[in-house]
Amino acid sequence: MSEPRSNFVARALEWLRAGYPSGVPRQDYVVLLGLLRRKLTEHEVRSISDDLALLALQGEEITTADVEKLINEATLDEASEEDVARVSAHLAAGGWPLADAPA
């Protein structure tokens, strides 16, 4: 497990324990962690944008589906509209707007 992800899990567990003064039953940890929505870090936004920009430089047309796919791979979770918008904005600022930019 990478350092940022393990720090995230540790912080999430601390938060859960603080919110449950009597303690969270061990069998509920996985379910509760699964309910937490993860947000891309700035580093992840830049990394995903760099990967997509490289494709654009190679002549590929970048779509929302491409952004969602890379976010899904990075987070192992479904891409949120907010994260897609952040990556799309980062790409557009670099001169690579999406072919089907989100609303």
Image: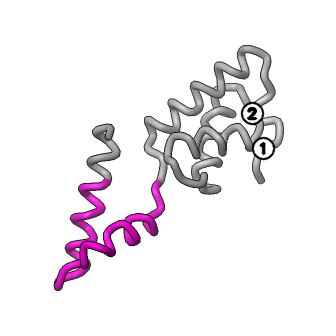
The residue indicated by pointer 2 is 97
Asked if the residue under mark 1 is in contact with the one under mark 2, i.e. CB atoms within 8 Å, the reply is: yes
Q: Residue at x 51, y 48 (%)?
A: 76
Using the image, tell me which numbered label, if any, was put on residue 101: 1
Q: Position of residue 6 (x, y in %)?
A: 28, 47
Secondary structure mainly formed by the magenta segment:
helix
Which of the 4 image quarters holds residue 98?
top right
Q: Position of residue 50 (x, y in %)?
A: 57, 25
Circle 1: element type: loop
Q: Amino acid at mark 2?
A: Pro
Tell which residue pokes out farthest to the left in this image.
22
Using the image, tell me which numbered label, if any, was put on residue 25: none
Q: Residue at x 71, y 16 (%)?
A: 57
| Nearer to us in this view, 90 or 4 | 4
| Nearer to us in this view, 42 or 77 | 77
Q: Residue at x 74, y 43 (%)?
A: 64
Quarter of the image containing the N terminus? top left
Q: Which region of the structure is painted magenta?
A: 9-38
Q: Amino acid at mark 1?
A: Ala
Tell which residue pokes out farthest to the bottom in this image.
22
